[in-house]
Amino acid sequence: MPYSSKHGKQYTLDLINRINPKTVLDIGAGSGTYAAYKKQGQHWTALEIWQPNIEQFNLKRLYDEVICGDARNVEFGSYDLVILGDILEHMSKDEAKSLLDKCKKSKYVIVSIPLGYYPQDEFEGNPYEKHVTDNWSRDDFIESFGKPWKEHQEGEIGVFVYRHLKICIYAISKNEEQFIKRWSDSCKDADLVLLADTGSTDNTANLAR
């Protein structure tokens, strides 16, 4: 349905604000839930499969660009953020994996999906509202798509966040307690930070965590 469960929505909005993307692709835009919070200077693109939703919810007013098409078949480039809000359950697991792999070219991908048995049929003539895979579990999702950067579950909705790693910082440490905060602050914008402690007897490891 163009409106989905309220669970996970605030967590997703908080993530969007934290990421503060310049370019966003909202796949399965529906009623434009997230675009309503678009900030000045951001460019949002809606990819919506059901043409009546575009007209009914005036998506061309909410988004900078609207594409009517099936995300499984539409070729798109890289964005700062791709949102897959309650989309992957509408396709087979193989199709879902292929679509998410395509989205992972972008810097961040936010996926929300019902977990557990959550059937849904067509709605108001829209055949794409039917759930094809309606029994995702958290473990099954992670096994299929890989470990996310962040995850959150609220009610029946799981939110999984993936990001494309670009900058990795690796360092070794031993008894660096007095320097660890300064070091951590200096690399806080990296995509991945790895610290190998070689046997500190002070508080280095705990402070690093």
Image (tube, grey):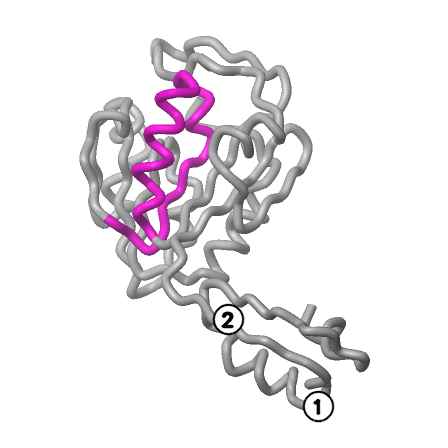
Residue closer to the observer: 76 or 142: 142
The quarter of the displayed image where residue 48 is located: top left
> In the drawing, what numbered circle is on residue 178?
1
Residue drawn at x 43%, y 12% is: 130
Residue drawn at x 51%, y 36% is: 112
Residue closer to the observer: 73 or 164: 164
Q: Would you say residue 191 sits in the magenta stretch?
A: no
Give the spatial CA distance, label 2 vs label 1: 19 Å
The quarter of the displayed image where residue 100 is located: top left
User: At which x and y percent is residue 102?
Assistant: 30, 37
Q: Would you say residue 85 sits in the magenta stretch?
A: yes
Q: Residues within 10 Å of mark 1 (few under 14, many from 20)?
A: few
User: Can you tell which of label 2 and label 1 is closer to the viewer?
Assistant: 2
Residue extending farthest front: 198
Please name the amino acid that badge 2 sits on.
Answer: Tyr
The quadrant of the picture occupied by the N terminus is top left
Q: Which residues are magenta?
A: 78-106
Please name the amino acid that badge 1 sits on.
Answer: Gln
Residue designated by label 2:
170
Residue closer to the observer: 181 or 17: 181
Residue drawn at x 65%, y 83% is: 180
User: At which x and y percent is residue 131?
Assistant: 46, 14
